[in-house]
Image: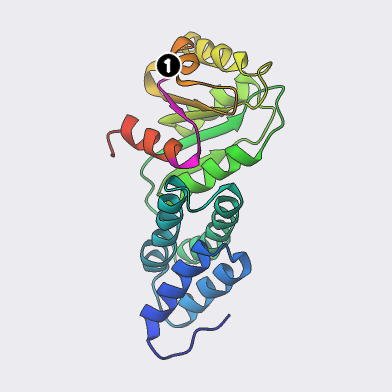
Amino acid sequence: MQVGTTGGEGAVLRALTESVIAGEVEQASSLARQALEIGLEPMRAIDEGLIPGIVEVGRRFEAHEFFLPELIMAAEAMKKGMAVLEEAIIARGGRREALATVVIGTVKGDIHDIGKSIVAAMLTAHGFQVVDLGVDVPAERFLSEVEKRNARVLGMSALLPTTMPYMQHVIEELGKRGLREKVKVVVGGAPVTPAYAQRIGADGYGDDAISGVRVVRELLGLA
């Protein structure tokens, strides 16, 4: 989609926002390229175009105006637009300043990906550097990435009741490695509850992508 020259930069920024809200994946990518073509700084396109869109999606999700399908499509649209703009930032010799690094993954034995991926996309949209380890992640991989990336947050997801005890195993291994005091641990997934998170020694719990972002910000003193 091409936005006409009338309205200029403001029109493109508004269209970017709307593309995220509407979950228009290819449109978000196209508009991100158009923003660069008309001379918009990529960081401005992110901050004034994409981010207001995902923030509005979060508001509508919490108000029960949007549901999981809309959230998934909005996250995908955000990801597509971000890919174009972050590539431009790197090509210009810059980088997007991240609030903090978050390592995230689905625990060993569990291959459910959607919820974790939405959380990762939302965290990225809100300015975090996210290292998504995927699914079926063993403790050693979590630990090595936390240490290598100097991550301030570790997020773990589980959808199966049989795999969620592995979260406690990872937390215990963090302690043995001397990393527990250096990283905040946030857990989530369908069978996980706030009481369970507290019992296994996690620092926080998120029951969906929006609350997950809020919890991470609160734990880091960014709320």
| Picture residue at 50% right of the left edge, 25% below the top | 187
Instruction: Determine which residue is flagged by label 1.
Output: 180
Q: Between 167 and 53, which is closer to the camera in this rendering?
A: 53
Q: Is any atom of residue 89 visible in this view?
A: yes
Q: Between 27 and 85, which is closer to the camera in this rendering?
A: 27
| Picture residue at 44% right of the left edge, 32% below the top | 151
Q: Where in the figure is residue 127, as x and y percent of width and height? A: 40, 49
Q: In the picture shown, does residue 60 fall above or below 197?
A: below
Q: Where in the figure is residue 130, as x and y percent of width and height? A: 50, 42
Helix, strand or loop status at disc 1: helix
Q: Which residues are magenta?
A: 202-210
Mark 1 Cα shell of 10 Å, populated few (<14), some (14-19), many (≥20): some
Q: Is residue 79 magenta?
A: no
* Numbered marks: total: 1
Q: Where in the figure is residue 5, as x and y percent of width and height? A: 44, 90
| Picture residue at 39% right of the left edge, 71% below the top | 41
Q: Where in the figure is residue 33, as x and y percent of width and height? A: 53, 74
Q: In the picture shown, does residue 23 fall above or below 194?
A: below
| Picture residue at 41% right of the left edge, 73% below the top | 13
Rendering quarter of residue 216? top left
Q: Between 30 and 146, which is closer to the camera in this rendering?
A: 30
- Image quadrant holding the C terminus, namely top left
Q: In the picture shown, does residue 167 fall above or below 155?
A: above
Q: Amino acid at mark 1?
A: Arg
